Image: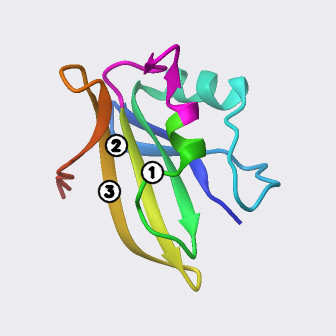
Amino acid sequence: MEAAGVLVRGENGPALIPEVTQQDPTQFHLKAATIITASESGDIVGFYHSHPDGTTALSVQDTRSMRIGGRPSWPGLTWLVLSVINGRCVDMCAYMWNSDRREFLSVAVLIDE
């Protein structure tokens, strides 16, 4: 089953706001209520989703959902893709919009403990 949700920077640090009603194992849909909950929890800084038994490369569906009219649907936010193999996260890649190249490019992920 695909996991998805919103990345938030709140008063107490980073948080994940999950989309808990995933039904489709190959696609994710974030409900408005999830995004509202996330915005009430802090600043939305990105979105995450998994690729069960797949890589962290963006799928065709990913790139469609990340754009509206050829532009980013959520400008300035990070999209984090997790590779999950046999139920375990084995890799992750973050993507951000590059306005010069007009595409999403991978960026470094820094984890502050």
Q: Is residue 38 magenta?
A: no
Quarter of the image for residue 7 reads top left
Q: Is residue 5 visible?
A: no
Decide which of tag 3 and tag 1 comes sooner along the chain.
1
Q: Tell me, for residue 58, which label it has, or none.
A: 1
Image height of 99 relative to 49, above or below: above
Residue 95 in picture, x, y percent from top left? 32, 43
Is 94 drawn above or below residue 29 in the view shown?
below
Q: Secondary structure at mark 2?
A: strand
Residue that appears at 45% across and 68% down: 55
Measured in 3D between alpha carbons, the distance from the residue under mark 3 to the one under mark 1, in whole angstroms, is 9 Å
Q: Nearer the viewer, mark 3 or mark 1?
A: 1
* Rendering quarter of residue 81: bottom left
Amino acid at dot 2: Pro
Please give the label number shown on residue 93: 3
- Of residues 112 and 75, the one drawn nearer to the viewer in this rendering: 75
Relative height, residue 65 to residue 110 (above, below): above
Tell me where residue 42 appears, x and y as whole percent. Answer: 42, 25
Vertical position of residue 35 compared to residue 7: above or below? above
In-image side of 90 versus 50 (left or right): left
Q: Quadrant of the C terminus?
A: bottom left
Crowding at mark 3 (Cα within 10 Å: few <14, some 14-19, many 20+): some
Per the image, the residue denoted by label 2 is: 14
The residue located at (56%, 33%) in the rendering is 64
Read off the magenta span: 64-77
Amino acid type at mark 3: Cys
| Badge 1 element | loop
Q: Residues within 10 Å of mark 1 (few under 14, many from 20)?
A: some
